[in-house]
Amino acid sequence: MDYNRIYADFIKDRRAKEGSLEGYVERHHIVPRSLGGSDDPDNLINLTFEDHYFAHLLLARIHGGKMASALWIMVNSSRARWRSRHHARRAYAAAKRYALSLMAEAWTAEGNPLFNPEVFDWTNYRTGCSRRATMYEMHREVGGSRPHWTNVATGQRPSYRGWLLTKNLATHKRSEKGQKFLFVNRDGREFFGTQAAFARAHKVSFATACRIVHQQSVSRCGWRREGVMDRRFNMPRSGENSGRKPTIFTLERDGIRIAGDRTAIAAAMGSTARQISAAMYAIRNGKVAAYKGWRLVKEETPDARAA
């Protein structure tokens, strides 16, 4: 089947109907940006939710790879819906319309269960301005997405565009522009410089450098700020796992066995922890027999170890 022709005819037809669309629509890149497409108007088209899903279904058929992943993320549904693509197309559109209708009211309509009418005291540490407003009012008047303000209000983000909760002003810490820090690595290396210089020198993202400085994080490659306790990547500051204990996997290949949690297994195989989780899920459900030649011999859950 010539999916390229089907996709071209589909886009041509929807372009002719674009002017008659009403209500919620989604912007679609005809040639996806991951494949070299631009943001030029000629490469953009407004589609209904059903048509947007169908367009990505065709792109997944044509290109596979990234486009298949994009389709899976878009649908974000059960495997049964993934197999029944026509049902998924309708279900995706219905769910998206319902979610958007709730989101449109969630910050304004007091009858909606998602509405948060709480009024917060906000202060801008850059300008000294203060005001009382809901998260929705800050979103509408200052800008940014609604999750930005939710994260500031719940403490998941220290500030946004200089605004933070007034009660957190006294404890808010922000490095001055050009401030330098001492970064240390568990392998003995040291680096003294700004966050940006550290990110450039060691080829990590600026966000990683910020997390090391402001959140006392330890990077995946072992970097931390001087004085911060060395601990495993993503482990809490206390150095102890506060949640459930990890599952221990035992894998075998060519008479060699390795055992450990998904992070340890990933390090031994040169994979990521997420890939190991997906592989173990596939093996448990009979989708594949092995991962990189390694077969699952034993899976020990925290409950089983306690027993």
Image (cartoon, rainbow, N blue to C red):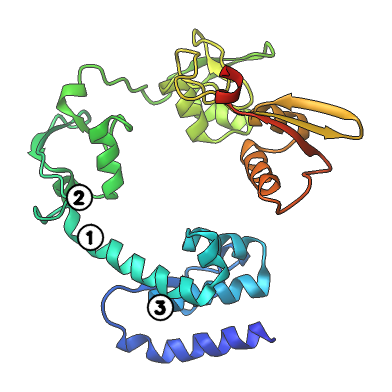
Residue 41 visible at all = no
Q: Secondary structure at mark 1?
A: helix
Residue with the mark numbered 3: 47
The C terminus, quarter of image:
top right
Which residue bears the numbered disc 1? 102
Q: Residue at 48%, 62% (x, y): give it.
A: 74
Using the numbered discs, state the Cα–Cα distance from disc 1 to disc 2 in whole angstroms.
8 Å
Q: Could you tell me residue 53's position as x and y percent?
A: 48, 72
On the image, the x and y values in percent for residue 45 come to 43, 78
Residue 44 position in % (x across, y down): 45, 75
- Front tag of 2 and 3: 2
Q: Which mark is residue 114?
A: 2
Q: Residue at x 53, y 64 (%)?
A: 80
* Residue furthest right as drawn: 254
Question: Of residues 158 and 293, which is closer to you in this image?
Answer: 293
Position above or below: 20 against 162: below
Q: Secondary structure at mark 2?
A: loop
Earlier in the chain: of badge 2 and badge 3, it is: 3
Residue 33 image-quadrant placement: bottom right
Q: Badge 2: few (under 14), some or many (20 or more) residues near its Cα, within 10 Å?
A: some
